[in-house]
Amino acid sequence: MSARDWRKSSYSSEGNACLYVSALDSATIRLRESDQPDTILTTNPTALRALIHSARKGQLDHLGEG
């Protein structure tokens, strides 16, 4: 997979803290962070949608504590 297959999140600012997304097919989504591009998280659209929904509702805020 080449660099052109990855799309930078529109919520990522300029600099080193950018999230990139790639869809291999309709059932597989890959995520990576610009600081560690060789570390790739693979998920599916349903699970990613649930994660984003939970984050928007603040249900994951406690994960950054302590």
Image: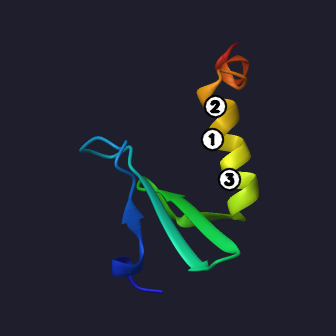
Question: Would you place residue 50 above or below residue 54 in this image?
Answer: below
- On residue 36, the disc is none
Query: Looking at the figure, which quarter contains the C terminus?
Result: top right
Dot 2: within a 10 Å radius of its alpha carbon, few (fewer than 14), some, or many (20 or more) residues?
A: few
Q: As shown in the figure, which amino acid type bears the numbered disc 2?
A: Ala
Q: As shown in the figure, which amino acid type bears the numbered disc 3?
A: Leu
Question: Would you place residue 59 above or below residue 6 in this image?
Answer: above
Dot 1: within a 10 Å radius of its alpha carbon, few (fewer than 14), some, or many (20 or more) residues?
A: few
Task: Estimate the x, y position of residue 65 in percent, counting from the top left.
Answer: 68, 14
- Does residue 14 appear to the left or right of 27 in the view shown? left
Element marked by disc 3 = helix
Dot 3: within a 10 Å radius of its alpha carbon, few (fewer than 14), some, or many (20 or more) residues?
A: some
Q: CA distance from mark 1 to mark 2?
A: 5 Å
Marks 1 & 3, CB-CB < 8 Å contact = yes
Task: Estimate the x, y position of residue 29 in percent, counting from the top left.
Answer: 62, 68
Which residue is labeled 1 in the image? 52
Q: Which of 35/58 is in front?
A: 58
Looking at marks 2 and 3 on the same chain, the residue that comes earlier in the sequence is marked by: 3
Question: Would you place residue 47 above or below residue 23 in this image?
Answer: above
Q: Residue at x 66, y 20 (%)?
A: 61
Q: Residue at x 73, y 44 (%)?
A: 50
Residue lying at the far top of the rendered structure: 66
Which residue is labeled 3 in the image? 48
Element marked by disc 1 = helix
Classify residue 31 by image quadrant. bottom right
Which residue is labeled 2 in the image? 55
